[in-house]
């Protein structure tokens, strides 16, 4: 009897279904998003019985939703995504819920409660902090140019609302323009060049990502404008931002972890049948010349 039982256990182990954690990523054309996938991949590597797969939507909302639908059809065990569009992704999130597949959101949310866990920093609070920092650096007087992240995402909404709700408290500070650069360096270069060429006068730039802050600084230098004379802030705290703060070209940024490692842990907890928190806020801190050398960039 013992031999038969042992044999059955061995057969059961050999034919056990491999658990699949599937990530529907917005785009791999952004260094921060690449790091997000890689951190999750590294955290899950070597875990017995667990397979990690991902798909790159190339910045296409419809394709990202299609990828999630594919994962639902394939009956993967956990779906992870960072939605490019908070409204449209809500519809497919309901499909995942109805199919009984846990959905983990990292860095970006949806407009419903049809998810298992949502991991992110507090974007609204970051927007508030950036506004307060810029107001202080400008002595509460001046013009601000805003470079916005993808407007259909919850980070962009939070970073914009937090900033505008706070900056309006300073009557002598005016937001003279806001351009969407989608957290892409190339687009930030183009939008900043256009702003300068069109005669836009600004004393500060609120870039809703470090990639856009870097692009803005590059554009200013190409236009023979000293970026150290402009109050420029970013969000993420990547290595490029660290160097620019040290060089005095970027005044501040805000640590914005990718959530990849945290997402991997939550996905594994779900596979283990553990109850996971519905919402997880990852701490963020302001990085300036005062602490730039004591805090490690996210990548």
Image (tube, rainbow, N blue to C red):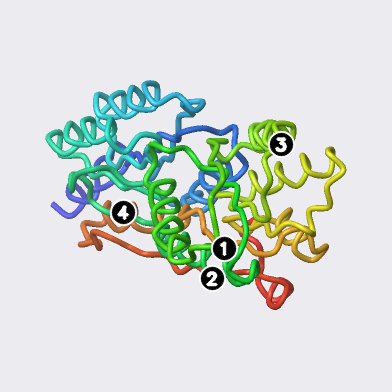
Contact, mark 4 vs mark 2 (Cβ under 8 Å): no
- In front of the other: 82 or 286: 286
Estimate the x, y position of residue 91 in percent, counting from the top left. 21, 31
Q: Looking at the image, is mark 4 or mark 3 nearer the viewer? A: 3
Estimate the x, y position of residue 211 in percent, counting from the top left. 65, 45
Q: Earlier in the sequence, mark 4 or mark 3?
A: 4
Q: Earlier in the sequence, mark 2 or mark 1?
A: 1
Q: Looking at the image, is mark 3 or mark 2 nearer the viewer? A: 3
* Other-residue count near label 3 (Cα within 10 Å), few / some / many at <14 / 14–19 / ≥20: few
Q: Residue at x 78, y 53 (%)?
A: 227
Estimate the x, y position of residue 73 in percent, counting from the top left. 24, 24
> Disc 1 designates what residue?
254
Contact, mark 2 vs mark 1 (Cβ under 8 Å): yes
Left or right of 247 on screen, residue 165 = left
- In front of the other: 198 or 194: 198
Q: Secondary structure at mark 3?
A: loop
Q: Classify residue 292 by image quadrant.
A: bottom right
Q: Earlier in the sequence, mark 4 or mark 2?
A: 4
* Other-residue count near label 4 (Cα within 10 Å), few / some / many at <14 / 14–19 / ≥20: many
Q: Looking at the image, is mark 4 or mark 2 nearer the viewer? A: 2
The quadrant of the picture occupied by the C terminus is bottom right
Q: Residue at x 23, y 43 (%)?
A: 111
Q: Secondary structure at mark 4?
A: strand
> Disc 3 designates what residue?
199
> Disc 4 designates what residue?
118
Left or right of 145 on screen, residue 117 = left
> Disc 2 designates what residue?
285
Residue 53 drawn above or below residue 236 = above
């Amino acid at each position: 009897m013992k031999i038969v039982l042992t044999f059955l256990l061995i057969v059961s182990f050999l034919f056990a279904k491999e658990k699949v954690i599937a990530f529907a990523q917005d785009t791999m054309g952004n260094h921060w998003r690449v790091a997000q996938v890689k951190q999750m991949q590294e955290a899950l590597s070597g875990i017995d019985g667990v397979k990690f797969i991902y798909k790159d939507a190339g910045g296409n909302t419809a394709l990202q939703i299609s990828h999630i639908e594919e994962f639902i059809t394939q009956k993967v065990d956990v779906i992870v995504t960072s939605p490019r569009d908070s409204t449209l992704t809500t519809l497919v999130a309901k499909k995942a819920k109805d199919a009984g597949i846990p959905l983990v959101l990292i860095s970006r949310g949806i407009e419903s409660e049809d998810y298992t866990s949502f991991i992110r920093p507090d974007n609204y609070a970051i927007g508030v902090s950036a506004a307060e920092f810029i107001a202080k650096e400008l002595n509460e007087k001046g013009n601000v140019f805003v470079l916005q992240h993808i407007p259909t995402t919850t980070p962009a909404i939070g970073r914009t609302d937090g900033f505008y709700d706070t900056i309006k408290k300073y009557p002598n500070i005016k937001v003279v323009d806001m351009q969407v650069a989608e957290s892409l360096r190339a687009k930030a270069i183009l939008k900043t060049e256009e702003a300068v060429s069109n005669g836009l006068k600004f004393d500060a730039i609120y870039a809703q990502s470090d990639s856009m802050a870097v692009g803005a600084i590059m554009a200013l230098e190409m236009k023979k404008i000293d970026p150290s004379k402009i109050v420029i802030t970013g969000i993420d705290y990547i290595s490029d931002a660290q160097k620019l703060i040290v060089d005095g070209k970027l005044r501040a940024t805000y640590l914005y972890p990718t959530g990849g490692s945290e997402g991997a842990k939550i996905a594994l907890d779900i596979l283990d049948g553990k109850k996971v928190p519905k919402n997880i806020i990852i701490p963020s801190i302001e990085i300036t010349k005062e602490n730039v050398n004591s805090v490690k960039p996210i990548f």
